[in-house]
Every structure is written in C-alpha cells, then in structure tokens.
Image (spheres, grey):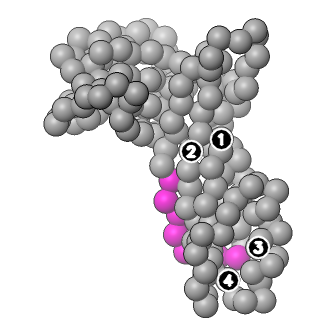
C-alpha cells in the first residue's frame, strides 16, 4: 500500500541522503519524493510516497525516521484531509497543423503551453497525480518526446468542518 509521509527536517547537508538511506536499508521503495524550504528559515519539508506492506512496517519506519537527529517531525498524512499537487512538464511532438487540436485537449485540464518549436510543444500541468496521468494518456498518440515530473507535495488542510478534498486511495492510484 502506498503511504504519504511528511517530514519536517533541518536544512543541512546530508539529511536527504540519511532519510533515503534509512528507507533503502529497510527495503522501502520510494515512488515519489519532493523537498523544499519550509516557512521557517533553516527548515525543509519533505513529502515521500512509499510502498509499505503493512501497518507494522509503517510504524517501524516512522519510529526510525523520528530517531534521526535532523528530523524534527514525521507524519503519515495518507488518511487525513490533505492538499496534494504535482507538476509535470510534457514535450509532445507537434506540427503546426496539430497545435490547435492539442490545445483543445489540454484546455480542460487547465494545462499551459510554455514553449513552441517547429516540431514540438512543451506543456505544463499542475494537479493531482491522476489528472496528470489522464492528460499524459490523451497526449500519447501524438508522440511524447519527454516527461519531467516533480513528485507529490502535500500538507494537511486547514481546520475546516469534515471537508476532504482528496482521499488517499483516490490520490495514489
């Protein structure tokens, strides 16, 4: 089962290596990882999506991550009300005749054309991973030349009455 783990860590050299090394030694597969500066100077946030066989193994890895010196907080946010997004850049083969057709496909996804050349288009899309996957599937027949994805980034929603934007099972398909 895939789980979304959020970590708050000290922004120091080697922290990412120690976190991923710990997961590797425990034979967890990281399917997505994103890291960036947090709201506090000197602190970073990591969002990991990992494959875990059962709750016992999840608890084990959470405890091990909490023991790391530079790790300030570890949370499994999979089953919580979260806001989660991913960014993808997609380069698609395109002739001038196909550009309006491709634009018609990407428009409902609120994707943008960010670069045009004589034989390709570069498209930017932000959203849930399933939305990005759906657009990629629609663009495949045109010939995808390159894809770059950021990986999932997420945090807990603000305190609101029982409103869940995403359920983890829907998000991680």
Mark 1 vs mark 2, CA separation in Å: 6 Å
Say whether disc 1 or disc 2 marks the residue closer to the N-terminus.
2
Q: Measured from the top left, where is residue 144 in percent x and y?
A: 60, 72
152 up-or-down from 117: above or below = above
Identify which residue is drawn at 27% across, 19% down: 71
Q: Quadrant of the C terminus?
A: top right
Could you say which quadrant of the image residue 105 lies in?
A: bottom right
Q: Are marks 2 and 3 in contact (CB under 8 Å)?
A: no
Q: Main secondary structure of the magenta part?
A: strand
Identify which residue is drawn at 65% across, 69% down: 113
Alpha-carbon neighbours of circle 1 within 10 Å: few (<14), some, or many (≥20)? some
Along the viewing direction, whichever of 147 and 96 lies nearer the viewer: 96
Mark 2 vs mark 3, CA separation in Å: 21 Å
Mark 4 vs mark 1, CA separation in Å: 25 Å
Say whether disc 4 or disc 1 marks the residue closer to the N-terminus.
4
Could you tell me which secondary element the residue under label 2 belongs to?
strand
From which residue to which does the magenta span run? 142-149
- Is residue 39 visible from the viewing direction of this image? yes
Mark drawn on residue 86: 2
Mark drawn on residue 94: 4
Residue named by callout 1:
128
Residue named by callout 3:
102
Q: Measured from the top left, where is residue 164 in percent x and y?
A: 73, 20
Identify which residue is drawn at 83% across, 69% down: 104
> On the picture, is 102 further left or further right than 41?
right
Q: Measured from the top left, where is residue 78 in percent x and y?
A: 57, 21
141 up-or-down from 125: above or below = below
């Amino acid at each position: 089962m895939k789980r979304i783990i959020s970590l708050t860590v000290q922004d120091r050299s080697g922290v990412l290596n120690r976190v991923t090394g710990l997961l590797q030694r425990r034979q967890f597969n990281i399917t997505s990882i994103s890291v960036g500066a947090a709201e506090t100077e000197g602190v970073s946030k990591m969002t990991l999506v990992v494959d875990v066989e059962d709750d016992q193994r999840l608890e084990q890895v959470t405890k091990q991550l909490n023991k790391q010196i530079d790790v300030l907080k570890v949370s499994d946010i999979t089953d919580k009300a979260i806001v989660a997004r991913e960014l993808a850049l997609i380069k698609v083969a395109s002739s001038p005749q196909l550009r309006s057709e491709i634009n018609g496909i990407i428009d409902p996804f609120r994707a943008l054309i960010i670069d045009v050349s004589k034989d390709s288009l570069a498209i930017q899309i932000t959203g849930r991973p399933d939305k990005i996957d759906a657009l990629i599937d629609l663009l495949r027949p045109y010939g995808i030349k390159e894809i770059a994805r950021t990986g999932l980034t997420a945090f807990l929603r603000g305190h609101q009455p029982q409103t869940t934007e995403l359920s983890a099972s829907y998000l991680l398909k």
